[in-house]
Amino acid sequence: MYGTSHNGRICSTGVDFRGISMNSKFYTSFVVDTEDSEPERQFTGVVELRGHGEDPPDADEIGRLLARKLNLDANQVRVLTWSRLH
């Protein structure tokens, strides 16, 4: 995912679903809450799920995937918006 935080910094994160049929792109906004992120850091951007099927994952699943990719606990990532791009 490539996007910008609320303070304009560039972030890049990849999320990979292997073994499923097609790629899908989603616009997302999420908040990272860690001890060293005072206040919370908000990020927005496009996330591409490689090999994703027709049914989009729910926000909780996306939060867990982003947290894992960012080496965070799942409760440290909160998804605000998540919608498929056409």
Image (cartoon, rainbow, N blue to C red):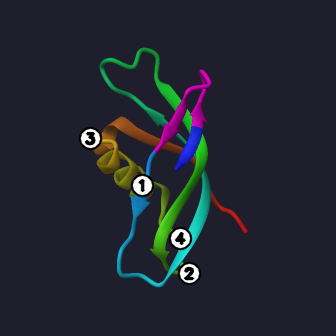
**Secondary structure category for the residue under label 1:** helix
**Where 62 falls versus 36 (above or below)?**
below
Say what amino acid the circle numbered 1 marks: Asp
Distance between mark 4 and mark 1 Cα atoms = 12 Å
Mark 1 lies on residue: 60
Q: Which mark is residue 73?
A: 3
**Most distant residue in the right direction:** 86
Q: Residues within 10 Å of mark 2 (few under 14, many from 20)?
A: few
Span shown in magenta: 4-12
Q: Residue at x 55, y 33 (%)?
A: 10
Say above or below: 25 vs 12: below
Q: Residue at x 41, y 81 (%)?
A: 20
Label 3: state its secondary structure. Answer: loop
The residue furthest top is 38
> x, y percentage for residue 48?
53, 61
**Does the magenta run of residues contain 1?**
no
The residue pinned by badge 2 equals 54
Question: Which of the 4 quarters of the picture holds residue 16?
Answer: bottom left
6 left or right, relative to 70: right
Residues at marks 4 and 3, CA–CA distance in whole angstroms: 22 Å
Q: Which numbered disc, 3 or 1, marks the residue that appears first in the sequence?
A: 1
Q: Is residue 7 magenta?
A: yes
The type of residue carrying mark 2 is Glu
Nearer-the-camera pick, 48 or 40: 48
Nearer the observer, 42 or 18: 18
**Count of numbered tags:** 4
